[in-house]
């Protein structure tokens, strides 16, 4: 199929409409069959549950053109399972796992001409989401829901390569104990917008959020999990019930232990430990790993040995291995790659 007329090497990380998107509706206690449609507009009541009480959740994953020319996506089953967890916590109907995966496959296949070619540095970002669409004026769950999935080609998150970033310890809290930090709810991201804008205005790239209860343990940023490397080469990631379980983080920890043979730990990470770490990175779908060069705690700087010029050596191995798996350059663990075409 002839590709869309896009300068693949120079697109940014933003929204470009594609030909088709998938839509399914939940009404009278059941999901309809759903369909691929061309209309990218949503019509709803002014009193829709999503508009009144933020009853919405979403996912994010990518499709790639591999080295051998196949179109694939990375671990969509885990995105489906995470959305199920989000729906349960927000009193929304579950969209079945197999239907979720099929919607991903069908939507990507229908937009094949927008899947960037191998070697361009670009990928096809996939955004499944669900929201309450029926009118709600009292504080309660909506009765009707819509599940939608669209995709859009995006450029590399970092133009010219991933340079280490500077983050600050935030005075704001991202999520409360027993709250919604462990699910991918839209409201979590709305809460982070003021803090991230404030960080940017003060010259920082991101926020490091500490646990709300004691403010002694590292949690995550507004949209990514932390990975640390100790001076003895152990890969450590924070463990907390209020952290979003990142699929990228889970995959990187498997790569570290099972493929690279590194020691790994998932445990509470106290902020007091950060100054003794050799490397630090933020991991998520968009960038895979964003290396951190410096953490600033109210004027006190923690500088990691790798510095501000390039990824640390262990972080680089993790990044190269996982992206190699995603792009088909390296053999993938069983079940990680869903071949679409």
Image (cartoon, rainbow, N blue to C red):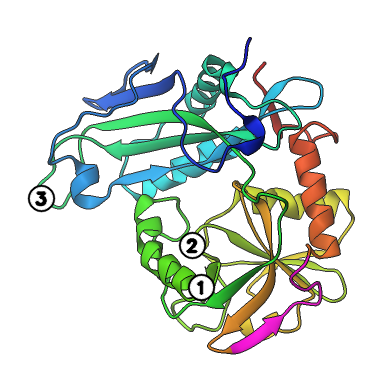
Task: Report the Cα–Cα distance between label 2 and label 1.
Answer: 8 Å
Verify whether residue 304 appears in magenta.
yes
* Image quadrant where residue 114 sits: top right
**Placement of the N terminus among the 4 image quadrants:** top right
- Dot 3 or dot 1: first in sequence order is 3
Neighbours of disc 3 within 10 Å: few (<14), some (14-19), many (20+): few
Which-is-in-front pick, marks 3 and 1? 1
Residue highlighted by disc 2: 222
Closer to the observer: label 2 or label 3? Answer: 2
C-alpha separation, residue under disc 2 versus residue under disc 3? 30 Å
Residue at the disc numbered 3: 138
Q: Which mark is residue 209?
A: 1
Cβ–Cβ under 8 Å for marks 2 and 1: yes
Q: Quadrant of the C terminus?
A: top right
- Relative to 197, 116 lies left or right: right
Q: Which residues are magenta?
A: 300-309
Q: Which mark is residue 103?
A: none
Pinpoint residue 18: horizontal percent, then vertical percent.
Answer: 47, 23
Residue 213 percent across, percent down from the top left? 44, 80
Q: Separation of disc 3 and disc 1 at Cα?
A: 33 Å
Determine whether the residue tagged by mark 1 lies in a helix, strand or loop: loop
Q: Secondary structure at mark 3?
A: loop
Residue 202, placed above or below residue 98: below
Judge left or right: residue 53 versus residue 337.
left
**SS label for mark 2:** loop
Q: At which x and y percent is residue 98?
A: 52, 25
Q: Earlier in the sequence, mark 2 or mark 3?
A: 3
Query: Residue visible at 61% across and 48% down?
Result: 157
Residue, x 71% and y 50% (percent of image)?
160
Magenta region's main secondary structure?
loop
């Amino acid at each position: 199929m002839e590709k869309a007329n896009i300068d693949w090497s120079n697109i940014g990380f933003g929204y470009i409409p594609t030909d088709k998107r998938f839509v399914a509706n939940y009404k009278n206690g059941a999901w309809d069959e759903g369909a691929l449609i061309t209309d990218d507009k949503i019509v709803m009541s002014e009193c829709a549950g999503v508009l009144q009480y933020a009853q919405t959740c979403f996912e994010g994953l990518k499709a790639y053109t591999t080295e051998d020319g196949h179109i694939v996506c990375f671990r969509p089953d885990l995105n489906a399972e995470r959305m199920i967890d989000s729906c349960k916590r927000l009193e929304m109907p579950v969209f079945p796992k197999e239907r979720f995966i099929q919607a991903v496959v069908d939507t990507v296949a229908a937009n094949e001409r927008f899947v960037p070619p191998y070697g361009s540095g670009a990928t096809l970002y996939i955004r499944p989401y669900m929201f309450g669409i029926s009118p709600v004026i009292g504080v309660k769950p909506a009765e009707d829901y819509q599940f939608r999935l669209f995709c859009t080609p995006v450029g590399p998150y970092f133009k010219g390569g991933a340079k280490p970033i500077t983050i600050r310890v935030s005075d704001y809290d991202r999520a409360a104990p027993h709250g919604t930090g462990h699910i991918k709810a839209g409201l979590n991201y709305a809460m982070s917008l003021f803090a991230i804008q404030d960080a940017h205005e003060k010259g920082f790239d991101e926020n490091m959020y500490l646990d709300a209860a004691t403010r002694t343990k590292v949690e995550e940023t507004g949209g990514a999990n932390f990975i640390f490397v100790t001076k003895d080469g152990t890969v450590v990631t924070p463990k907390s019930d209020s952290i979003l379980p990142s699929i990228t983080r889970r995959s990187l920890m498997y790569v570290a232990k099972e493929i690279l043979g590194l020691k790994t730990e998932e445990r509470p990470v106290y902020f007091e430990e950060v100054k003794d770490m050799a490397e630090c990175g933020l991991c998520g779908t968009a960038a895979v790993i964003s290396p951190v060069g410096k953490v600033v705690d109210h004027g006190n700087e923690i500088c990691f040995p790798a510095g501000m010029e390039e990824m640390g050596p262990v972080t680089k191995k993790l990044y190269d291995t996982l992206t190699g798996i995603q792009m088909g350059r390296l053999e993938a663990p069983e079940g990680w790659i869903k071949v679409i075409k």
